[in-house]
Amino acid sequence: MEQRGGVPNKSNEEYRRQFRELTENFMVPDPNECIVCFLVRAMELLEPTGFAMTAIYRERNAPRASNLGGRLARLGIHGDYQLIHDGVLVNLAVWDVERCPECGVPETLPDCLQVRRGSTQPCELWRWRREVERAQFDAWPHPISWG
């Protein structure tokens, strides 16, 4: 590593790695914060793939949820970012949301509505996308049986 004026030159990737290492120690979920509110709050630290922040959540708030990754995979979720981007929807019955035009993520977030300790469910601010889609499908008129 070259030095210029007594200051070491570091690559941007090295700075990002050091920033991530420092901030991961400070970014922890609040005791009854839901997993989705925690991930949205940790948005700047989310990797494009993988469950690094979900693992931190599980270790701190839901240590007995040993099959969390498997459960999320059955929902078609394969990473932290995908969980908040594709796995849940804003519960419009609870709050009106302004979204980022580029990514669709809420621009502001009200305080988490809390979950019980050990839960890996979202709070009432969020709904699992799959449950919303299932409810919409069930609400469609059923076809006439020709049997």
Image: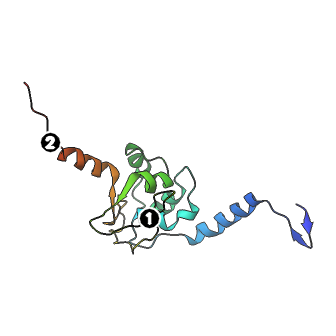
**Residue with the mark numbered 2:** 141
- Tell me if mark 2 has few (under 14), some (14-19) or many (20+) residues whose alpha carbon lies within 10 angstroms of its own: few
- Considering the image in quadrants, where does the N terminus appear? bottom right
Query: Where is residue 97 drawn, in percent x and y?
Result: 38, 67
Which label number is shown at residue 106? 1
Query: In the figure, residue 62 lies in which quadrant?
Result: bottom left
User: Is 117 on the left-hand or right-hand side of 145?
Assistant: right
Q: Closer to the camera, 104 or 10?
A: 104
Q: Residue furthest top?
A: 147
Q: Residue at x 23, y 49 (%)?
A: 135
Query: Where is residue 81 drawn, in percent x and y?
Result: 50, 54
User: Is 10 on the left-hand or right-hand side of 143?
Assistant: right
Number of callouts: 2
Amino acid type for the residue under numbered disc 1? Pro
Q: Closer to the camera, 76 or 145?
A: 145
The structure's colour scheme is: rainbow
- Element marked by disc 2: loop
Q: Closer to the camera, 146 or 28?
A: 146
- Element marked by disc 1: loop
